[in-house]
Image: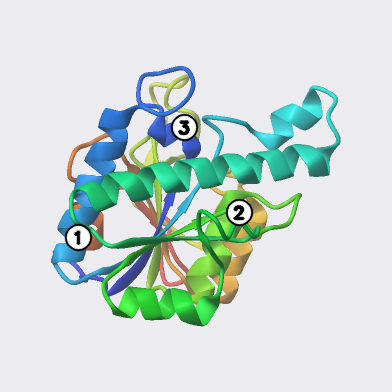
């Protein structure tokens, strides 16, 4: 058992909300995520979440299909707000006070992103979900997660994925792929391991925020990660490649 964190940022991909579906949101998956977040907050951990929108719309794919890239990215940002509101509803149904803050003004359904207000919500035990990406096209929600983690002084960034860590090659293609237990930021960048985009990795490196990559599909993994159990792969300047 390692360190128990006090304030964390959890990055959820839009695809994570699909479960076994090919599109949209699986309510059972969202409920399971909400229950795990509830368990963590009940232990006194302050939780902020950045959610993607790839289960509904992905800007890069829209641009590849001929859309203007900036327009496609803005549509993707709106998709993240839909996911954020869905997750908020699931959390509040089980009694977890939650606020959605968006980088794009949508005052009828969410608060605008205000750093000091977000921190205050966390201090009061509320889960804060950041929607709308960074509010700027050409930036991923991974970069948003790194940016928000730095802004709210999170101790760690958790990247919840469909695999159980970072590998030296795609384990779905190469059965001999090696999973790393720990990596430096520099190794992730130099080897182009692509667990997050290079801007996100560099932001975490510059602000000394460790990144822990783990498998979201294993029940209880969010709590295990937050409570300091050794799961997945940790990326941090203090780590050695192993």
Question: According to the image, label 3 marks what residue?
Answer: 15
Q: Is residue 158 above or below residue 14?
A: below
Corner quadrant of residue 163 = top left
Residue pictured at 79% horizontal, 31% vertical: 63
| Tag of residue 125 | none
Question: Helix or strand or loop: what does disc 2 sit on?
Answer: loop
Question: Percent from the top left, x then y, of residue 119?
Answer: 42, 78
- The earlier-in-sequence mark between 2 and 3 is 3
Q: Residues within 10 Å of mark 3 (few under 14, many from 20)?
A: many
Question: Percent from the top left, x then y, of residue 80?
Answer: 54, 44
| Tag of residue 40 | 1
Disc tally is 3
Corner quadrant of residue 126 = bottom left
Corner quadrant of residue 240 = bottom left
Disc 2 and disc 3 in contact, CB within 8 angstroms:
no
Question: Helix or strand or loop: what does disc 3 sit on?
Answer: helix
Farthest front residue?
Answer: 108
The one of 115 and 205 positioned closer to us in this rendering: 115
Question: Percent from the top left, x then y, of residue 47?
Answer: 32, 64
Q: From mark 1 to mark 3, how far is it between C-alphas?
A: 22 Å
Q: From mark 2 to mark 3, how far is it between C-alphas?
A: 15 Å
Residue pictured at 26% horizontal, 30% vertical: 28
Residue 30 appears in the picture as rendered: yes
- The earlier-in-sequence mark between 2 and 1 is 1
Residue 180 appears in the picture as rendered: no
The one of 177 and 26 positioned closer to us in this rendering: 26
Question: According to the image, label 2 marks what residue?
Answer: 133
Q: Is residue 61 above or below residue 218?
A: above
Residue pictured at 62% horizontal, 54% vertical: 189
Q: Quadrant of the N terminus?
A: bottom left
């Amino acid at each position: 058992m390692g360190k128990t964190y006090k304030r964390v940022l959890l990055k959820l991909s839009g695809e994570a909300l699909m479960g076994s579906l090919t599109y949209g949101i699986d309510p059972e998956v969202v409920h399971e995520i909400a229950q795990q977040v509830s368990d963590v907050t009940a232990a006194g951990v302050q939780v902020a979440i950045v959610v993607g929108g790839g289960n509904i719309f992905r800007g890069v794919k829209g641009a590849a299909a001929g859309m203007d890239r900036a327009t496609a990215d803005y549509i993707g940002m709106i998709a993240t707000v839909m996911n954020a509101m869905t997750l908020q509803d699931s959390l509040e149904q089980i009694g977890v006070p939650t606020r959605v803050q968006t980088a794009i003004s949508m005052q009828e359904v969410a608060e605008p992103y205000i750093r000091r207000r977000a921190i205050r919500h966390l201090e009061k035990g509320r889960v804060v979900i950041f929607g709308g990406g960074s509010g700027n096209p050409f930036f991923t929600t991974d970069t948003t997660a790194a940016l928000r983690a730095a802004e709210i002084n999170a101790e760690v960034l958790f990247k919840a994925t469909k695999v159980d860590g970072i590998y030296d090659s795609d384990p779905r293609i190469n059965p001999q792929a090696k999973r790393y237990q720990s990596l430096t930021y520099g190794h992730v960048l130099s080897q182009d391991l692509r667990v997050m985009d290079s801007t996100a990795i560099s932001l975490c490196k510059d602000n000394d925020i460790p990144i822990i990559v783990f498998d979201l599909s294993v029940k209880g993994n969010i709590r295990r990660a937050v409570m300091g159990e050794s799961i997945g792969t940790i990326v941090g300047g203090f780590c050695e490649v192993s």
